[in-house]
Image (cartoon, rainbow, N blue to C red):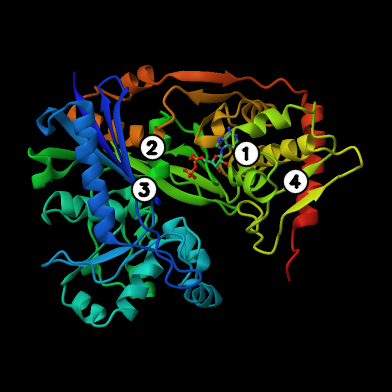
Amino acid sequence: MAYLLSLDQGTTSSRAIVFDGAGAILSVAQKEFEQIFPQAGWVEHSPAEIWSTQISVAVEALAAAGLAPSQISGIGITNQRETTLVWNRLTGKPVYNAIVWQDRRTAAFCDQLRAEGVEGDVQDRTGLRLDPYFSGTKLRWILENVEGARAQAERGELAFGTVDTWLIWNLTGGAIHATDPSNASRTLLYNIHSNDWDAEMLRLLGVPRSVLPSVLPSSGLFGEASHSMLAAPIPIAGVAGDQQAALFGQACFAPGLTKNTYGTGCFMLMQTGSKPVASTNRLLTTVAWKAGGVTEYALEGSVFIGGAVVQWLRDGLKLIRTAPEVEQLAATVADNGGVYLVPAFAGLGAPHWDPYARGAILGLTRGASAGHVARAALESIAYQVTDLVSAMEADSGIHLAELRVDGGAAGNNLLMQFQADLLGVPVVRPGITETTALGAAYLAGLAVGVFSGRDQIQKQWREDRRFDPSMPREKVAELRAKWSKAVARAQSWEE
Ligand code: ADP
């Protein structure tokens, strides 16, 4: 039997999972690390802690699986995306903390660029919007604000990387400075059409080319992990950003196949094939991966408050004690009783994009109960996801055939059934919901020959449960119209 080690470097914890050649999980190890908030709107991680937690969970997972490093055929890496690091090429020492994707410190600079009217051109080149979320303006911030950094960068002494690049660098003892196109396409520096760093974007953001990593295929040899803690060299053979890895782990190999992750927020990606699809509904166009010599693309949209609305029922309203209890409470009523909850706690994301929207509960009557509110909260997750699907269908011209789901709230059967009813297509939950780590293992396994091809993975990929739509379409249209009315009431609340 062949084995693969997947390193899943997330925003709050580093995880390592050992898979066997049949895609089954042998062991999991996980360590949380510190979130650093130096000022309002700033979020940082310690690069040293990202690395130390990641390498130690790797060693722990191998031990728990009872395997020696020499028995591992390949390492797959998947990571929190957009988080930005800069280090000295000679010493390997970071010049600043990692600036996390959530960090908003470059908002004013993004506004300034937008005022110059360059956003359309930026979107054409990168598939992204001018938002502090992406790496490019964070990298610029480090070069501008860390003493001596710009001069060092101009002399070729500094290396930039997203978290995958930082892990590869450390695993290979500083021998390899590389990333993959799925991560590169989140930097604002990468041209998704030419598949190379974009000279105009580098000029616009003031980034010298010398700091950039080489971009290697997501499935292929990056180098050998030769760190002494691993005791035997292992090929690093698969790399992808977390959402793209999940798309791969959900075996979304054909155009139109779509996955949604129901976590704190929701992340939806639709595979669109080998040509990038430009969005007219304010979604992102991103590289899904480069594998087997072909670059494939995806449309991406996110919902800010997904499972978090259930946390709010638990911690804010204290209607439930644990998140899964929401299903029981919602099942105490036959339907929403006309109650709609718009969880615009942090404004609304795609396709509404209204930072001034705020949360609202509408349609309350004397008959409204806690059950109705719980049901409205759960349903709000499904309505938001349905709005995203509509935007994706409009952009891609592809009609969704089914939705593959993962993440904590995908365990909620009532929510999944309602989702299927709204979409009018089946919702499919896989047997292994660790799709992010699984996707990285698949990418690595394909490169080192553990899997013969995507067909084999397709055959391995198992459904746990399928939810078929059963609600009449007129009823769905009625509910969605009411939901849209509720969203309109919640919009532009703050001035
Ligand atoms: P993240 O990776 O963003 O931390 P997870 O995938 O671990 O998220 O999912 C956790 C989220 O899912 C929480 O917001 C929680 O409220 C929600 N959640 C967990 N279980 C359920 C459930 N059975 N029903 C609805 N929501 C749930």
Q: Specify whether 11 is left or right of 235.
A: right
Identify the residue position indicated by label 1 in the image. 321
Query: Could you tell me the amino acid type at mark 1?
Result: Arg
Q: Nearer the viewer, mark 1 or mark 3?
A: 1
Task: Give the structural element (helix, strand or loop) at label 3.
Answer: strand
Q: Is the residue at mark 1 in contact range of ligand 1, meaning its CB lies under 8 Å from it?
A: no
Give the alpha-carbon distance from disc 4 to disc 3, as whole Å: 31 Å
Q: Is the residue at mark 2 in contact range of ligand 1, meaning its CB lies under 8 Å from it?
A: no
Q: Earlier in the sequence, mark 2 or mark 1?
A: 1
Q: Earlier in the sequence, mark 3 or mark 2?
A: 3
Residue 341, label in figure:
4
Name the residue located 44 percent from the left edge and 22 percent from the top edge: 431
Give the alpha-carbon distance from disc 2 to disc 1, as whole Å: 28 Å
Q: Earlier in the sequence, mark 4 or mark 1?
A: 1
Give the alpha-carbon distance from disc 4 to disc 1, as whole Å: 20 Å
Identify the residue position indicated by label 2 in the image. 436
Ligand 1 placement by image quarter: top right
Residue 327, relative to residue 132: is it above or below?
Answer: above
Give the alpha-carbon distance from disc 1 to disc 3, as whole Å: 24 Å
Q: Residue furthest right?
A: 366
Task: Give the structural element (helix, strand or loop) at label 2.
Answer: helix
Task: Give the structural element (helix, strand or loop) at label 1.
Answer: loop
Give the alpha-carbon distance from disc 2 to disc 4, as whole Å: 30 Å
Q: Earlier in the sequence, mark 2 or mark 4?
A: 4
Task: Give the structural element (helix, strand or loop) at label 4.
Answer: strand
- The quadrant of the rendering that contains the C terminus is bottom right
